[in-house]
Image (cartoon, helix red, strand yellow):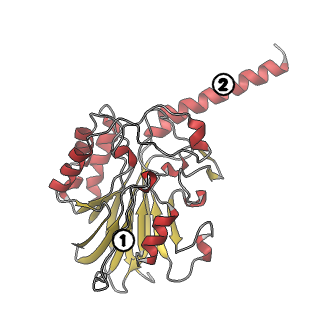
Amino acid sequence: MNGLTRTALGALAVGATGLGYASLIERNAFTLRRYTVPVLPHGAAPLRVLHLSDLHLVPRQRRKIEWVRGLAALEPDLVVNTGDNLADLEAVPAAVRAMEPLLELPGVFVLGSNDYFAPSPKNPARYLTNGYRKGLGGQPLPTSDLVDAFAKAGWVDLTNARAALEVAGHDLDFVGVDDPHLNYDRYPGRSELETPSGELTIGVTHAPYTRVLDEMTSDGAGLVIAGHTHGGQLCVPFYGALVTNCDLDRKRAKGVSRWWPGAGSLPSSAAPADAAWMEVSAGLGTSPYAPVRFACRPEATLLTLVAKGS
C-alpha cells in the first residue's frame, strides 16, 4: 500500500467517523442555552422566557419528545415557539405531546415553512451556498391541526398579528409575522391611535430575514426572537456557521446579539445605545433527509429578561 492510498483511506476513515458522530451523537445531544438580556424597565422583576424552535419532529423521535417535555421543570413564565415543529404528515400528535406540559403556561407562536409543507430530498450543496429556498411543491401538512391545538391551550397565534399579554405581572406587547422564508410575512400595521402600552415589545419570527428585523426594530421592538438558521447546522470549530439559510450574517446565526435598522453585517459592538436585542435559536432538529449536526448542538433557550443596567 503506497503513501497516497494510505492517505486516502485515512481521510475516508476520518470522514466516516465525523459523519457517524454528526448523525448519531451530536444531533441527539440536546442542550439548554441560558442568556440574560437587559430589556426591561429599571426596577422591573426578572422574566423567564423559554424559546423553542425547529423541532422538525417525526413521531419516532421519543428522546426529543421527552426532552422537550422535561423543560417544563424550568418553570418559565412564558414560552415562545418560532415554528418548524413538524417533519412528517403524522407529526402533529407528537408535537402536541412534546409541548403538552408547556401548553399549560402562557405562550405565543409563529409558523415556519416546515409547519406548512413536508420535507423532501434536496441537494445539500444548495443549502451550503445559501441558495436554498423552500418551494411550495411539498406535500401540505395538517397545519390547522397544529394551530388549533396550540390556540385551544391558550397560546397566542402571532401570524402577521399583534397581541398584548400580561405575563407574571409584566405587560408585554408582541408583534409577529408568518414565515418570511416563504414570503408569507405581512407586517401587521396599526393606526396612529394605537401605541404600545407594555413594558417591552417583543418581535417574533421564524426566519430572521433582515427586512423583518428592520421592520420590527423600527417599530419599537426591544427584543426579537427567531429560529430557522439551525445555527448553521454544520459548523467549523473556532469559525462558526458557514451559512444561515437566509440573508442574516453568519456571525448572528445563533445566540444573542444586537440589531438595529440597517445593521446588516455590522458587529454588535457598533450598535447604538438603543439597539434592540436579538436571540436566534439553533433549534432542536434537522430535516429527516439531512440528519446531521456538527459543532452545533441542538438547543432550546432560556432567556432571563432583566432590567436595563442590571
Does residue 189 lie above or below 57 as drawn?
A: below
* Sooner in the amino-acid sequence: mark 1 or mark 2: 2
Q: Secondary structure at mark 2?
A: helix
Report the residue at 47% width, 39% height from top.
27
Q: Residue at x 38, y 67 (%)?
A: 187
- x and y percentages locating residue 35 in the rendered image: 44, 65
Q: Residue at x 34, y 78 (%)?
A: 200
Disc 1, disc 2: CB below 8 Å? no
Residue type (three-letter) at the residue carrying disc 2: Ala
- Mark 2 Cα within 10 Å, few/some/many (few <14, many 20+)? few
Q: On the rendered structure, is 160 left or right of 275?
A: left
Q: Residues within 10 Å of mark 1 (few under 14, many from 20)?
A: many
Q: Is residue 26 left or right of residue 146?
A: right
Mark linked to residue 13:
2
Amino acid of disc 1: Ile
Tag on residue 202? 1
Q: Position of residue 100 (x, y in %)?
A: 21, 48
Q: CA distance from mark 1 to mark 2?
A: 47 Å
Residue 153, position in %: x, y? 16, 55
The label nearer to you, 1 versus 2, is: 1
